[in-house]
Image (cartoon, grey):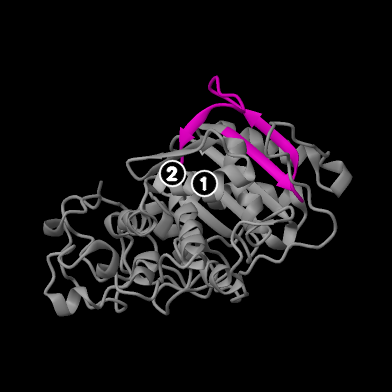
Amino acid sequence: MKIIISISVIAILLSCHKSPVPDATPTPTTDSYYFPPTTSDTWDTKTASSINWNETNLQAAFDYAATKNTYGLIVLHKGKIVKEQYWNSWTKDTKYYIASAGKSVAAFVAGIAQKEGIININNKTSQYLGIGWTSLPLAKENLITVKNQLTMTTGLDDGVPDQDCTTPACLVYKADAGNRWAYHNAPYHLVQNVIAAAAGTTFNTYCKQKLFDKIGMPNAFWLNYIMYCTTREAARFGSLILNKGKWNATSVLDDATYFNAMVNTSQNLNLSYGYLWWLNGKASAMVPGSQMVFPTSLNTNAPTDMVMALGKDDKKIYVIPSLDVVVVRLGDSAGTTALGPSSFDSDLWAKFKLAMNY
């Protein structure tokens, strides 16, 4: 499916002012962070008033989300549920696809694979997929590394008719690897193939063993490069990111160097992009479907240290280290066509700002 940037995204970005460029590395406070049990759906809660949030304004944010095809919305503070609500006949057990928000999950799993020594993201992709995985001349193909796939800098043409096509005929030269940022599904899909080839199993099996089973995500699975899970399971993953790859006493990803690189600027073309993660608070940003560089951060209404897993039709996993907050929004399109940041992000966080008092 071809990625199209919405006019609303351009308007929002052009109307914003420059923001400072913070370190986006999650640094949650050390006082007790709650982790729900991995073998049950028990989950502790707390009230908004107990953390000096405005309950009326928090409900207003949820009410707004409800008008925008939101079916599941959950807010965690230090791991505990502050507010959770479902619409459209959804419950906490409803599974749904999270679209390109799954890219960020795959980036995390790539870090596990590298820590285990089965891949090295600095190696050329052909080491795992074989020579001729693209239609490029060998010298150009050999420039592409797994890291280029994680950072959207393969140089492969994102203007092909089918961005999801991973056959060599669809993987066409546009620029040397590392010289052009473009949001392109096919090279990302092949990150999963790289890990599967290196692990000698399916990506779904590897992800289940190394991630899902470790943090209590029994319903999560991958199908045709797309991840499905419940709203609560997506929130569990957000908590894992907030805690730098640790789940309680378990280090799911024990590689601080990789983790920090993943959630900070990964190249000098799009400052607002890490390893398949979107980053707020940077001096400039690019968005899907465009080669424009906007002189602003992605969301001036949200905390500058927010990192985001974002998917089509406004699938969202927001992680905000400075607030010890995770927010997950699942559902269908909030009325935007962008795959990345959208006007919905900005409007929702304007309301959360009034509730969370940041």
Q: Residue 159 at what x, y percent from top left?
A: 19, 59
Mark 1 is surrounded, within 10 Å at the Cα level, by few (under 14), some (14 to 19) or many (20 or more) other residues, namely: few
Tell me where the magenta segment starts and ends, as one range.
72-99
In this rendering, is residue 46 above or below 289? above
Residue 52 placement, left or right of 82: right
Task: Measure how far apart labels 1 and 2 are at the Cα level.
Answer: 6 Å
In this rendering, is residue 162 above or below 331? below
Residue 227 placement, left or right of 349: left
Residue 82 inside the magenta-drawn segment: yes
Disc 1 target residue: 209
Residue drawn at x 22%, y 67% is 156
Task: Report the amino acid beneath label 2.
Answer: Thr
Disc 2 target residue: 205
Residue drawn at x 85%, y 58% is 31
Please say if the residues under marks 1 and 2 sit with CB atoms less than 8 Å apart: yes
Q: Nearer the viewer, residue 133 or 26?
A: 133
Secondary element at image label 2 = helix
Q: Residue 195 at what x, y percent from top left?
A: 38, 57
Mark 2 is surrounded, within 10 Å at the Cα level, by few (under 14), some (14 to 19) or many (20 or more) other residues, namely: some
Residue at the farthest front position: 200
Residue at the farthest right position: 50
Residue drawn at x 58%, y 39% is 217
The C terminus, quarter of image: bottom right
Q: Residue 45 at what x, y percent from top left?
A: 80, 37
Residue drawn at x 27%, y 55% is 186
In this rendering, is residue 113 above or below 355? below
